[in-house]
Image (cartoon, rainbow, N blue to C red):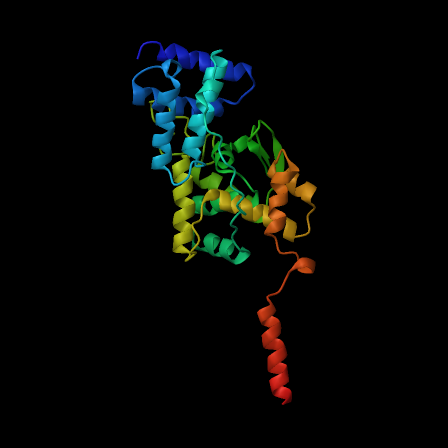
Amino acid sequence: MAGFTSLLHRFERNISVLGRAQRTFDCYSRHVAALALHFKCLPTELDAEQVQDYLYLLQQRSKTPSQTYFKHTVYGLRFLLKTEGLPYDFLKLPSIPKVDKLPVILSRQEIWRMLQTAKLLKHKLLIGLLYGCGMRCMEVRNLELKHLDFDRKVVHIVQSKGNKDRYVPLSEHLIRGLKTYIQIEHPKRFLFEGTSSKDPRGFDGRYSQRGVQWAVGEVAKQAGILKEVHPHMLRHSYGTHLLEDGNSILICQKLMGHASIESTMVYLHVCQLEEQLPKSPLDRVFAQCRSDKNKA
């Protein structure tokens, strides 16, 4: 497709100049490329009707238009047209309705069952870092050996979401497991290397996102957990349990790397603080009525 390569080069340059991360370009470019392949022309040559038809097609494929693929297509196309200096308001790209859903979390017992069920040390550590450090899937995949500080018992999470760094405490149990894993596996750069780490085609050697998702989901199934467990659920559980352990909302925000306190406050709705823990009125019915029956 004539001109597509140069368009992508400009897109990458413009995203970099605007201070966005490389992964933003990687994400947006994939969706822009899919759009170009569908119509067999440059995305900048499409008219409003074609774009609307494509977005409608994506809506039909998805259960909800808020799904990630649809959202990234919209954002990527908007960004491309904006950086090319082309009008994009006339396209009337639909806004993504925000669905207010409370996060689903795992209990401490379910976390324990997953850790005990995982057969591979790699999978135990993967689950331990996702939960014990509240790491995002991308963050655990990007984790390099140099980011682990066993002396200070912290992990340095570098250039995370929003290009922000943060330090998070490492559990003693994780440190022991990590040292053993490093001695056995001898990773070169990334802590968790994928099967393509020695591939001559230029893979960067990281554990794939799909690999992380599969490992977490498979261990959860083997542990008999009925919830549909994904990596981010472990992060949700981390934030919730931090608050339940008595940490302040500001400490929780800092450890999770949230730019906005509102993102952290969501966990207040699901955490169970002892002094605020409500009880079902059914328990009161049983307690009172049984007592009355015994007196009679």
| Residue 102 spot, x, y in % from top left | 54, 47
**How far across and how far down the image is residue 146, in percent?**
55, 31
Query: In this rendering, would 178 be left or right of 208?
Result: right
> Where residue 283 appears, x then y in whole percent?
59, 71
- Judge whether residue 152 can be spotted in this image: no
Quarter of the image where the N terminus is located: top left
Tell me where residue 253 sits by quadrant: top right
Q: Position of residue 5 (x, y in %)?
A: 37, 12
The answer to which of 222 and 36 lies nearer the viewer is 36
Above or below, 264 against 156 in this view is below
Based on the displayed image, in which of its 4 quarters is residue 77 positioned?
top left
| Residue depicted at 56% across the width and 44% down the height | 175
Q: Nearer the viewer, residue 166 or 191?
A: 166
Residue 28, above or below 151? above
Q: Quadrant of the C terminus?
A: bottom right
| Left or right side of 248 for 1 | left
Number of marks present in the image shown: 0
Do we see residue 3 in this rendering? yes
Task: Say which residue appears at 63% left-offset and 49% top-offset.
Answer: 268
**206 or 83, which lies in front?**
83
